[in-house]
Image (cartoon, helix red, strand yellow):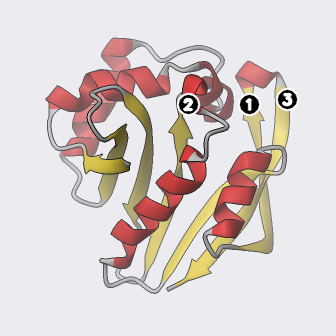
Amino acid sequence: MAYLTKATSMNDFDNYLKVKSDLPAIAWSGFATAPNPDNLRAYFQKVLNNPDIHIYFMFEEGSEDVIGYAQFVEENADEVHYAGYSVLEKYQGKGYGKLISKLIFEKISELPVKKVFGWISEHNIPSIKSWLANGFVKKEAFKMIRLEALAREDRFDLYEKTL
């Protein structure tokens, strides 16, 4: 059985580096290459110091190998921005994406917010399926984002879920 654990200290950085350096995560990040570990470490420290940003890692019971991560940001008293998730390539296609979203929505539902929103590339079919399965609705708003590792610009559609 898979479960989430919240990132609470710099001891969690190695897991963060691992998921952010995985090829699919790089592709959807907008960057061309894996992150510089020193720069990512500084960013991770800032995130840990910000009570509005939440990072969770997914593990399988009895294993210390990280499967993936999810991140959300409390934008204001009413809204949470689900900044997305990533499942390591070797675990993809096994339902972990849908599960990590389900588990993170359970965490978000503990907050006194009314709406969750996020942006997904029209080409990221697994994420679209996962979010729709978890009650999100595609809205008309979109934005164009350059994905350097994929050498293209994608349309990212807005998805929302009312709690």
Q: Residue at x 64, y 27 (%)?
A: 24
62 with respect to 149 (left or right): left
Above or below, 62 against 17 in this view is below
Q: Residue at x 77, y 55 (%)?
A: 143
Q: Which residue is mark 2?
A: 91
Q: Are marks 1 and 2 in contact (CB under 8 Å)?
A: no
Q: Secondary structure at mark 1?
A: strand
* Residue 60: percent from left, percent from top: 36, 39
Q: Residues within 10 Å of mark 1 (few under 14, many from 20)?
A: some
Residue type pointed to by label 1: Leu
First of labels 3, 1 by sequence position: 1
Q: Are marks 2 and 3 in contact (CB under 8 Å)?
A: no
Residue type pointed to by label 2: Tyr
Indicate which disc residue 147 carries: 1
Q: Residues within 10 Å of mark 3 (few under 14, many from 20)?
A: few
Marks 3 and 1, how far apart at CA: 6 Å
Tell me the quarter of the picture where residue 44 sits.
top left
First of labels 2, 3 by sequence position: 2
Q: Are marks 3 and 1 in contact (CB under 8 Å)?
A: yes
Q: Residue at x 27, y 27 (%)?
A: 64
Indicate which disc residue 152 carries: 3
Which sits in the foreground, 49 or 82?
A: 82
Q: Residues within 10 Å of mark 2 (few under 14, many from 20)?
A: few
Residue type pointed to by label 3: Arg
Marks 2 and 3, how far apart at CA: 26 Å
Q: Residue at x 84, y 44 (%)?
A: 123
* Residue 9: percent from left, percent from top: 14, 37
127 with respect to 163 (left or right): right
Residue 144 visible in the shown view: no
